[in-house]
Amino acid sequence: MESKLINKSAIKPAPIDVAVGILIKPTGEVLMAQRPVGKPYAGYWEFPGGKVETNEAILSALVREFQEELGIEINPDQAQPWCGCDYVYPHAHVRLHFYLCRDWHGEPRGLEGQQLAWQGGAIDVQPILPATIPLLEWLLQAC
Ligand SMILES: Nc1nc2c([nH]c(=O)n2[C@H]2C[C@H](O)[C@@H](COP(=O)(O)OP(=O)(O)OP(=O)(O)O)O2)c(=O)[nH]1
């Protein structure tokens, strides 16, 4: 019987989709959040968002994550798809879907105990999640 060889190093799990939102005030300030204790890369700064659940649309995940993490309602019709990237961390291979959000209701609060920081002009918080760092330069041009 014919046997087939599989190169196990070539088998990669599917990436995990992550919906990420960049809240932008009319002043151009953007909101960053610090990852809370208990998550991989705790203490690192990121744009708010989280993993897309099975059979969930990316935009629906974005709306849900902003409700759960920040207690605000973003307007999905006004959320602008911006860019995406893949990144392989030791804990996961993620596929990030970034949206620019200028329309929301409510004042963001760190409902999971995370620190929040509005950043304008330059991004001062450190450290930032590695996959997000390359986007910061583009973002300053987009705001
Ligand atoms: N929200 C967000 N996640 C990012 C960014 N950059 C980046 O590499 N990631 C990665 C880190 C994580 O591996 C993944 C997000 O997963 P997460 O664990 O924070 O998602 P979640 O809120 O659904 O968490 P949980 O329910 O599983 O606790 O995406 C970013 O700017 N924002």
Image (cartoon, helix red, strand yellow):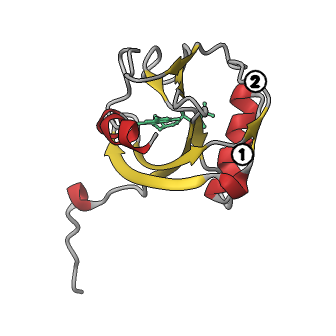
Task: Name the residue: 38% across, 15% down.
Answer: 124
Question: Residue placed at 46% from the left, 22% from the top?
Answer: 120
Which element carries disc 1, helix, strand or loop? helix
User: Where is residue 91 drawn, in percent x and y?
Assistant: 40, 34
Question: Viewed as shown, does residue 3 lie left or right of 104?
Answer: left
In the foreground, 36 or 135 = 135
Give the label, 1 or 2, closer to the camera: 2
Residue drawn at x 47%, y 53% is 82
Q: Which residue: 32% across, 31% down?
A: 130
Q: Is residue 75 left or right of residue 46?
A: right
Q: Amino acid at mark 1?
A: Val
Reading the image, the residue beneath label 1 is 63
Q: Is residue 105 above or below residue 6?
A: above
Numbered tag placed on residue 42 in the rendering: none
Kind of residue at disc 2: Glu
Quarter of the image with the N terminus in it: bottom left
Residue 138 in the image: state x and y as whole percent: 34, 42
In the picture of the structure, the residue carrying the numbered disc 2 is: 107
Instruction: Judge whether residue 18 can be spotted in this image.
Output: no
The front one of 21 and 122 is 122
Position of 76 with respect to 24 (left or right) is right
Query: Neighbour class for label 2 at 10 Å: few (<14), some, many (≥20)?
Result: few
**Who comes first in sequence, dot 1 or dot 2?**
1
Report crowding for label 1: few under 14, some 14 to 19, many 20 or more residues within 10 A (C-alpha).
many
Is residue 85 depicted above or below 40 in this figure?
A: below
Q: CA distance from mark 1 to mark 2?
A: 15 Å
